Amino acid sequence: MGNKYVLILVIFTVWMVFFDTNSWFIHKELNDEIDKLEGNRAYFKEEIKSDRNQINKLKDSEELERFAREEYLMKKENEEIFIIEFEDSIKTDKDG
């Protein structure tokens, strides 16, 4: 009589771990994906905070001018810009 219950328990456990649509493996995969997405969420929250700070800085006209000069190489009339690149600041194919 006891062997029948043990056999049913073993079959049920094997079914729940491997074959059921809510199996342990599927739950593990989903939990891993949730952890990955929460990591992405934290990263993007930091990026949003950084972008908001940058936007607030750019409301100042002097800061906006500095940003335009550095990022887009803009210049004033009758002004020349010389770009100086050092050997270690130049990206190569190895840098990716």
Image: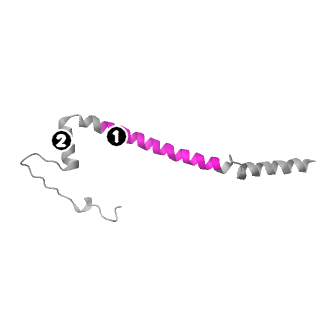
Element marked by disc 2: helix
The amino acid marked with disc number 2 is Glu
Which residue occupies 57% across, 48% down? Answer: 32
- Residue extending furthest front? 21
Indicate left or right for 21 with 51 as reference: right
- Looking at the image, which is closer to me, 50 or 72? 72
Residue at the farthest left position: 78
The relative height of residue 64 versus residue 93 in the rendered view (above or below) is above
Name the residue: 48% across, 45% down.
Answer: 39
Q: Which residue is mark 2?
A: 65
- The magenta stretch spans residue 46: yes
Task: Decide: few, some or many residues near mark 1? Use Cα within 10 Å; few <14, some 14-19, many ≥20.
Answer: few
Quadrant where the image shows the C terminus: bottom left
Count of marks placed on residues: 2
Which amino acid does the dot numbered 1 rest on? Ser
Q: Residue at x 26, y 58 (%)?
A: 89
Q: Secondary structure at mark 1?
A: helix
Mark 2 and mark 1 lie on one chain; the one further toward the N terminus is 1
* Residue at mark 2 to residue at mark 1: CA–CA distance: 19 Å
Residue 34 picture location, percent across and down: 55, 44
Q: State yes or no: discs 2 and 1 in contact (Cβ < 8 Å).
A: no
* Image height of 88 relative to 52, above or below: below
- Label 2: how many residues lie within 10 Å, few (<14), some (14-19) or many (20+)? some
Numbered mark located on residue 50 in the image: 1
Coloring scheme used: one colour
Please give the range of residues in magenta: 26-53
**Residue 50 relative to residue 26: left or right:** left
Q: Is residue 94 above or below residue 44?
A: below
Q: Main secondary structure of the magenta part?
A: helix
Q: Position of residue 19 (x, y in %)?
A: 72, 52
Residue 90 position by quadrant:
bottom left
- At horizontal 67% and vertical 48% (from top left) the residue drawn is 24
